[in-house]
Image: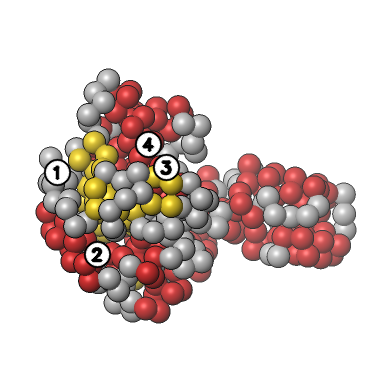
Amino acid sequence: MKIALLAPPRIQMLDLVGPTDVFAEAARQLGKPRTYRIAVIGVRPGPIKGTSGLRVETDDCIETFDAHIDTLLIAGSPAIGDITDNLRVLHWVRRQAGKARRVGSVCSGAFVLAAAGLLAGRRATTHWNSSAALARQYPNIQVDADSIFIRDGNLYTSAGITAGMDLALALVEEDHGRDLALSVAREMVMYLKRPGGQSQFSAQLAAQSAERNAIRDIQHYIIEHLATDLSVPLLARHMGMSERNFARVFKADAGLTPAEFVERARIDGARQLLDSADVSLKRLANQVGYANVDGFRRAFVRRLGISPNEYRKIHAPQKNAR
């Protein structure tokens, strides 16, 4: 499978080398080095220099590269705007996309797909810090600012930087199965198969930002005990504090009330279960601490704007017909 990665000027190197290393490790484990053949394509001839100062030699440039490819990926750059109005680039992307089996982007690479007209009427994501600009510039795209990566038909978009590796793992799973994808993730010491629908703003990430160790500890306790009673009175007793003081300190450190954090953690947990297993909503609700499906559904819609069943349809694992 020939994979072409368009590398824009001032590229963030992890957008490029992260996915390519995932594909290379998958090929190594299969014992077939040419399973994935990578071509790094520049906007112009010669090496490209990344934001870190590192340089990468390209295999070709858009002026001369016209080989058949299986997968086209557009890497991101803080200077992505330099090429989104470049008609040569957009014409090349449209032409290659018309021939490729699948097309995707890492981080702000989504702006190139959007400028080429490939995301019109589609769901897409990008780095959380660029999602508002993507939605504003291209109102015909349904921008999801929260997901790690999104598949809509044969178009794939992923969130910021390291999410490109999650997307590459998902493509490996489509091509060669879940066992290989998990094995690659383990070898690369990655989060094992981070689902596309997982939030860019997870409760786990929020739990690392509290200033006080005690608040971080209670946040991790919440994440690890979703199915239990996580009311303010119980959490306050766990901390050895009055309810009023606990609520005040928690909000000051975490930027959320205890109830808001508990809901975020429970919905994050539900999203992972919806991504990874076909469990009933009743059982799933119980596993993340909701007494009934109605309460769970209301919280899910309040947080994400769609129902659990709608979420499952969108993020259910898909296989390409081969």
Q: Is residue 237 left or right of residue 37?
A: right
Q: Which mark is residue 321?
A: 1
Q: Which mark is residue 89?
A: 2
Residue type at numbered disc 1: Ala
Kindly report which numbered mark, 1 or 2, lies closer to the viewer in this rendering: 2
Q: Secondary structure at mark 1?
A: loop
Q: Quadrant of residue 123?
A: bottom left
Percent of width and height locating residue 305: 44, 69
Front residue (pair 232, 264): 264
Percent of width and height locating residue 203: 60, 53
Q: Is residue 180 above or below residue 146?
A: above
For the residues marked 1 and 4, what is the alpha-carbon distance in whole angstroms? 22 Å
Q: Earlier in the sequence, mark 1 or mark 4?
A: 4
For the residues marked 4 and 2, what is the alpha-carbon distance in whole angstroms? 26 Å
Residue type at numbered disc 4: Val
Q: Quadrant of residue 143?
A: bottom left
Q: Earlier in the sequence, mark 1 or mark 2?
A: 2
For the residues marked 1 and 2, what is the alpha-carbon distance in whole angstroms? 29 Å
Kindly report which numbered mark, 3 or 2, lies closer to the viewer in this rendering: 2
Q: Is residue 302 above or below residue 185?
A: below
Circle 4 residue: 22
Label 2 crowd bin: few (<14), some (14–19), many (20+), radius 10 Å: many
Label 3 crowd bin: few (<14), some (14–19), many (20+), radius 10 Å: some
Q: Are marks 1 and 2 in contact (CB under 8 Å)?
A: no
Q: Earlier in the sequence, mark 4 or mark 2?
A: 4
Q: Which residue is drawn at the image coordinates 87% and 54% (left, top)?
A: 241
Q: Are marks 4 and 2 in contact (CB under 8 Å)?
A: no
Q: Which mark is residue 18?
A: 3
Q: Are marks 4 and 3 in contact (CB under 8 Å)?
A: yes
